[in-house]
Image: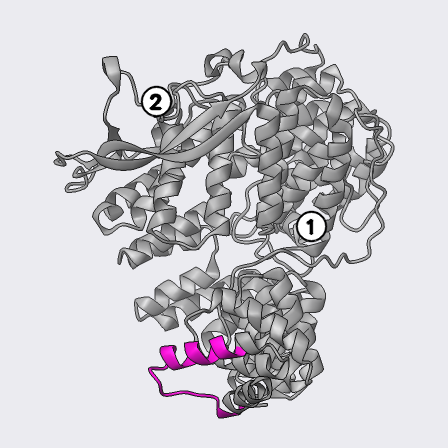
Amino acid sequence: QKQRDISHNEHPLIGPPVLEPTGRARAMPQFTPGTAISDLELQLLELTVPYDEEVPEVSVRPEVVSFRQGQFAAAVASVLDLAPSEALATAESVPDWFAALGPALGSIGDDSVLVMGAAALCEFVRQNVTGPCPPGGSSCSPASSSAQTEIDVHENRQKTENHPHGDRWAISQLSEDGEDVEGVVVGPQYLLLARYCLVGPPGSASPAAGRAHASWAWWAGRAALTQQRLLRGRSATLCVLCEELWSAAAAAAPAWPRALRVALALESAARHLAYSRVADARSGLDVADGLAGFGAELAGVLGTRTAHQTEAKAQLVVSVSRRGAWVRDRGAARVDDLLPPDVAAAGARPTQTPDGADDVLPGPRLVEGAGGRPPAAAAPRDLHSLEQALLLARAALLRKGSAGDAVRAGQLAAYAEAVVAQDLSQWVLATAARLQLARLELERPRTRIRGLASLEGVEEAGGAPRPPAAARLRCAFFGALPLRTPLRRELGEALVAAGAVASALPLFEGVELWDSVIVCYQLLGKRGAAEALVRRRLEVRPSDPRLWCALGDLSLDPGHYRRAWEASGGRSARAQRSLARLAAGAGRHAEAAGHWRAALALSPLHPEGWFSLGYACLKERDHAGARAAFTRAAQQQPDNGEAWNNLGAAHIALRAWRPAFAALTEALRHKRDSWQAWENYGAVAARAREWQAAAHALQEVLRLSDGARLDLEALEALVRRLERCA
């Protein structure tokens, strides 16, 4: 049977992961179902969750007071002052300080360790997501706060291009499964400290085991997921760790206040979306909706979309339903740090609307109901913060789980506009809604300039001095705001799409997104300048594998990728992927397969890698290897029709007709307009004696090829079958 290969898909989406932990032993916390939460834990969580019930009296402990005031670095320093460790005080470098941290943690008590871990995580989120920036633009590291003189001297001696040696070491420790940290990260030592306190150092057993605090696993899961968000690709190790930690948190949650359980379900859904597990995320949001007694659906309401439109037409809006006393008793106004969205997200809005953008309204102007009241179908304007977060989570799920078209754009806009229309909102939620609307405006030619201005406003909002850090942190762990570096990448790519390549270039350089820097220089016709820039950086940081890979991208010299592999100590999956692509481009498919296997051994949650490995195996006629690789690609990316089609081709080569028929049936769900897929399907259906499917496939091939293609072998088998039945 003739095989028909589908060409390599260079930019696949990342789908549901196939878990391949690296074998690190961890002891997860064991909680009795329904473990009650302590007053201390409630005081910590209340700063991150819109919890508007009565909160216990605030502790007088200095670290807790600092935490609740949003002074997270001060809270960390207060706990470190309790550690009677001479090794911490006399450490001469950041690695030495972290090596001494483990024994010191055992002497300060679980309460203090939890506070320090939570404070370190919140400080990292403040510096990289929510802001505001500290006075002077930087803050000290946790290590220098307890060993000031020795570490500062060492850091100043090792400092290069404003990147302290300790931060570079911390970034290397946060890399996982061969996946590098993407771009510039501010304060990485705080995230590493949070990991040490809550999860344990990379590669060690988790100290979460045996802890009495019911919310410990929740904080640890937050730290692990934040670490994943730093990486260029998905980490199987972190995926397994998050699964274990959230399972432990869920086991303890039944006795918690309802608001905390809703927030936990929201964060669990966000975790699933981070690994593109759309079905699991949808189930998690359904749980959150049920706990909150909240439902949302899209409805049509008469209104106008442009300034000069006179005839009202149906506009898509969100209609909500509320069930249970919990949501009836809690209006948005009961949380005291809420602000009107125009104030909460003031920095996220363009200060001046560009000329010509006023024709299309930012949101629909709805026809008022009787007595001037808003339409009954529209969402009320007093939604609780958790209800607003549920709407944004539904939008994130829709964006991840459906194809981009005009219908989806209207649905996404309806969710975001419902949040923007609220009388009061949290800073994170208001900013995330503005970001969502900016993305949608960038997709429409008539609003592209306004969308670009709005996106710039969102990017600048993190640097605004108000509101304070404590107010910004609430909802930050499930509010759908990206890290600062990915947000700047998004802004830079929008500038490039608008033709402002020269404006995007310094933005990419500032956050060390070298791949994007190279693209900009190439678009400007300055390939030599790009290579000179990378070589200058290498003179300062000769052991940075990311720079060697960037130089390889410019020169297409495999030697540079090999240097990157050596500099990483055999841990750079990116280097092996680049070597594989070079070999495949030169037709050396056996060599390419070897490089793909090396990359996938480090980072198995990479569907493009599995697809490319399968393609190389097909070229080498290793059909069993191709079958295994395409199976993994299809598992991780179920909507990849090419992966299913090539899996069918591998089964055909192995003369496994039933599995081939099943794979090609799935392929046609995503590639219904491909006559090649229908032709493969018809041939296999005839072999599998699925006669109706074979007849339908022949019809589709004729239709899609305008009568130019017909599989005579399948047609002959079908005619013989009809003759026997006659």
Asked if 703 appears above or below 241 in the picture, the reply is below
Instruction: Mark 1 or mark 2: name the one nearer the start of the chain.
Output: 1
Q: Which range of residues does the magenta coloring cover?
A: 694-713
Q: Quadrant of the C terminus?
A: bottom right
Asked if 529 appears above or below 679 in the picture, the reply is above
Per the image, is 711 magenta?
A: yes
592 left or right of 79 in image: left
Residue type at the position of mark 2: Ala
How would you rate the neighbour count of disc 2 (Cα within 10 Å): few for under 14, some for 14-19, many for 20 or more?
Answer: few
The residue carrying mark 1 is 239
270 left or right of 467 in image: right
Residue 223 figure quarter: top right
Q: Magenta region, mostly helix, strand or loop?
A: helix
The residue that appears at 57% across and 67% down in the rendered structure is: 666
SS for callout 1: helix
SS for callout 2: loop
Q: Position of residue 193 (x, y in %)?
A: 70, 38
User: As rendered, which of 458 and 440 lies closer to the eye?
Assistant: 440
Residue type at the position of mark 1: Cys
Residue 186 figure quarter: top right
Q: Position of residue 722 (x, y in %)?
A: 55, 85
Q: Is residue 53 visible?
A: yes
Per the image, is 304 magenta?
A: no
The residue carrying mark 2 is 376
User: As rendered, which of 665 and 177 lies closer to the eye?
Assistant: 665
User: As rendered, which of 205 and 316 lies closer to the eye?
Assistant: 316
Q: Position of residue 296 (x, y in %)?
A: 47, 31
